[in-house]
Amino acid sequence: MFGKSSLLVAFLASSVAFAANQALTATAIVTDKHKHSAFECWQLDAPFTTSTGAGTAGASTLQLGNLANATYTVLPPHFEGGVHNAPHPQYVLFTAGLAHITLPNNPGEAYVVGGGEGLVIAVDTTGGGHNTSYPSGETTIGFQIPFEGGKYPAYKVLNKGPCTVSQIRST
Ligand SMILES: *[C@@H]1O[C@H](CO)[C@@H](O)[C@H](O)[C@H]1NC(C)=O
Ligand SMILES: *[C@@H]1O[C@H](CO)[C@@H](O)[C@H](O)[C@H]1NC(C)=O
């Protein structure tokens, strides 16, 4: 059911990125001042550093902050999540499948392809919420990982709307 053009949209809307300055960039879903869910492109302040850890020494790593717990969710093909708020401020990491996020009261949409660019930051715990559907014929796997105490890491907003392809460096 996915034609070339929707795959292109999916690519353009890929939502996690390694920016040229070695910071992690991911699409965030926030609550705006009108109490509507909205997209922002966030760059986390924590920089990549060179790991000295066993098994990863020499590789790039960064700290994602203090996290509370993790839920592993299996979404069947064509599942409709409906309109909802983030239950907690959290990372949502899609490792397989495809999520399509739309906003009832704001423009923009994000196709999040499961895999290396599958990270979203959902902090719209109040307001009108966002609508997530899983339009592909594949099972989507999502990890929901709330921030400890609801406290998310320092970030800056690169732009309104989801992160774009120009913000992505994939290697
Ligand atoms: C997971 O963490 C969130 C945020 O701290 C908390 O509200 C929730 O109760 C926790 N869930 C479990 C199963 O521990
Ligand atoms: C959520 O999005 C799906 C897919 O775009 C759409 O079919 C559905 O009507 C939306 N649901 C609501 C409640 O807006």
Image: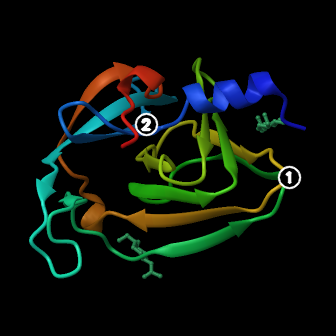
Horizontal side of residue 107 vs 154, given as left or right? right
Q: Quadrant of the C terminus?
A: top left
Residue 104 lies, with reference to residue 97, above or below; the image says: above
Q: Which residue is mark 1?
A: 137
Q: At 57% across and 20% down in the image, what residue appears? A: 106
* Near-viewer residue (171 or 62): 171
Q: At 31% across and 34% down in the image, what residue appears? A: 42
Extreme-right residue of the structure: 1
Residue 37 lies, with reference to residue 98, above or below; the image says: above
Q: Earlier in the sequence, mark 1 or mark 2?
A: 2
Q: Quadrant of ligand 2?
A: top right
The total of numbered circles placed on residues is 2
The answer to whether the beta carbon of the residue marked 2 is less than 8 Å from any atom of ligand 2 is no
* Near-viewer residue (64 or 48): 48
Q: Which residue is mark 2?
A: 27
Residue 121 lies, with reference to residue 157, above or below; the image says: below
- The image quarter in which residue 100 lies: top right
Residue 120 lies, with reference to residue 33, above or below; the image says: below
Q: At 43% across and 59% down in the image, what residue appears? A: 88
Residue 34: % across, % down: 45, 22
Residue type of the residue flagged with mark 1 = Gly
- The image quarter in which residue 101 lies: top right
Residue 45: % across, % down: 15, 42
Residue 148: % across, % down: 27, 68
Q: At 69% across and 54% down in the image, what residue appears? A: 97
Residue 154 in view here = yes
The answer to whether the beta carbon of the residue marked 1 is less than 8 Å from any atom of ligand 2 is no
Residue type of the residue flagged with mark 2 = Thr
Determine crowd level at label 2: few under 14, some 14-19, many 20+ residues with C-alpha closer than 10 A.
Answer: many
Question: From mark 1 to mark 2, how far is it between C-alphas?
Answer: 24 Å
Name the disc covering residue 64, or none. Answer: none
